[in-house]
Image (cartoon, helix red, strand yellow):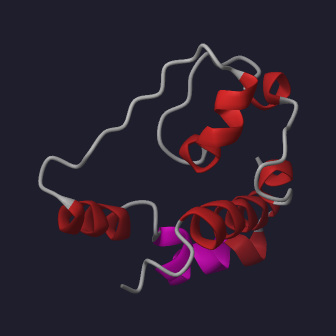
Amino acid sequence: WRKVANSPPGSQQDWDKVFANYTATVDNPGCCVWRELMVAYPDAKVLLTLHPRGAEAWYESTIDTIYFTENLWQFKILEWLTPFGRKFGDMSRKLIWGRTLAGVMGD
């Protein structure tokens, strides 16, 4: 996923390698590259789901769950101390927060 995150948007990847041992993707980070995945897997099903309580509830849920990579000091320590933390933080910062949700989390 770091290679995907470090590639320009629209780049095709070795998706069979990215998804080795998997047959599907749900939510992040797969949803960040749904267009690229549709090119690679044109017969795949793509489902759009909406938060049952609306956009504001989605935002609150995102802040409470996956946004920890950007706003929790504990994750910053994990990034500083571990290779996994650095890799995961790099991927999420570039792909999720820097590309897909660029500039919208503060709004």
Residue visible at 38% across and 61% down?
Answer: 65
Residue visible at 84% across and 26% down?
Answer: 17
Q: Position of residue 96 (x, y in %)?
A: 59, 62
Residue visible at 45% across and 61% down?
Answer: 66
Which of the image's four quarters has the C terminus?
bottom left
Q: Quadrant of residue 88?
A: bottom right
Q: Say if the magenta span includes residue 83.
A: no
- 9 or 81, which lies in front? 9
Q: Quadrant of residue 55?
A: bottom left
Q: Is residue 13 above or below residue 42?
A: below
Q: Say if the magenta span includes residue 72.
A: yes
Q: Position of residue 102 (x, y in %)?
A: 57, 75
Secondary structure predominantly adopted by residues drawn in magenta: helix
Residue visible at 47% across and 70% down?
Answer: 68
Q: Position of residue 54 (x, y in %)?
A: 16, 58
- 53 or 83, which lies in front? 53
The magenta region covers: 68-78
